[in-house]
Image (cartoon, rainbow, N blue to C red):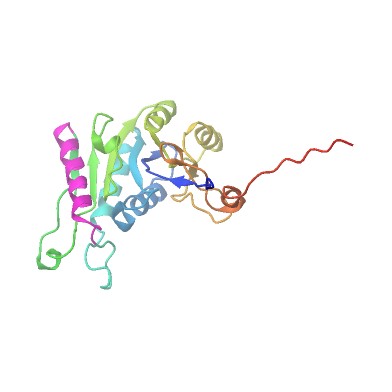
Amino acid sequence: MHIKRVSLELGGQSPFIVCKDASIEKAVAACTTRAFSNMGQICISINRIYVAKEIADEFISKLVDRTTRLKVGNGMNPGVDLGPMFSHAQRQKTKEHVADAVQKGAKILCGGNEPEGKEFERGFFFLPTVLANADHGMKIMREETFGPVAPIMKFETLDQAIRLANDTEYGLAAYIFTNDLSTAIHAAEKLEAGGVGVNVNNVAELQAPFGGWKQSGFGRELGHFGLEEYLEIKHIRFGL
């Protein structure tokens, strides 16, 4: 018998922080893509959005506008942005998370249900959803939904946003949008995640290590770090 080396990428619950000095248009575009691409069924999808209270209303308005313009349907048809979810069970979990959030005070700003029409009878379709008034008492802010839902919570200070972002058992990816370099560096150092995207919505690069902290796994993929996960280190000591 021989013990094999492994690296594991497990769950994620990625936070997306939008500071008051951020470019709102860029943040909204990045958020829409990373929250809803593949119906949110991506390990580094945005699961929680924290927006500075000074710009929250404008950010939310623009995010809802952009979200409602996404077209759901058969992915083989021209002009379709989002297809179905991959299983009935995953759609049910998404619906349960939305229902739990609403019961605890969240407000559905768009989506929140299955689309109507004959074209949606086959396939596990669900409308991309934006929730306001989210908080950490809701499942959707604590568990990985793995569905097309973007819950939003306002914050007053950057330290509060970082504390909320780190208040999870997961640590795969985190994102922050700001135009201040010192803010970006401070947040990137404090966020408890294997990858931090500053003004970008992707932390996967072929030449860079990819993997999670805490319950998001151990070990790394990509770059020379990914190769080293499967190599044995040998120490040779000579006495001359």
- The residue most toward the right is 240
Q: Residue at x 35, y 36 (%)?
A: 50
Which one is nearer the viewer's eye here, 32 or 204?
204
Q: Is residue 55 visible?
A: no
Horizontally, is 98 left or right of 151 in the view? left
Residue 223, percent across and down?
A: 59, 53
Does residue 93 belong to the magenta stretch? yes
Query: Magenta-highlighted stretch: main secondary structure?
Result: helix
Q: Is residue 145 visible?
A: yes
- The residue most toward the front is 1
Q: Quadrant of the C terminus?
A: top right
Does residue 153 belong to the magenta stretch? no
Residue 12, percent across and down?
A: 38, 42
Q: Residue at x 36, y 48 (%)?
A: 45
Which one is nearer the viewer's eye here, 188 or 238?
238
Which one is nearer the viewer's eye here, 105 or 237?
237
The quadrant where residue 155 appears: top left
Residue 28, percent across and down?
A: 36, 49
Q: Is residue 220 above or below residue 240?
A: below
Q: Is residue 130 above or below residue 239?
A: below
Q: Is residue 103 above or below residue 94?
A: above
Residue 78, percent across and down?
A: 28, 73
> Magenta residues?
84-105
Number of marks: 0
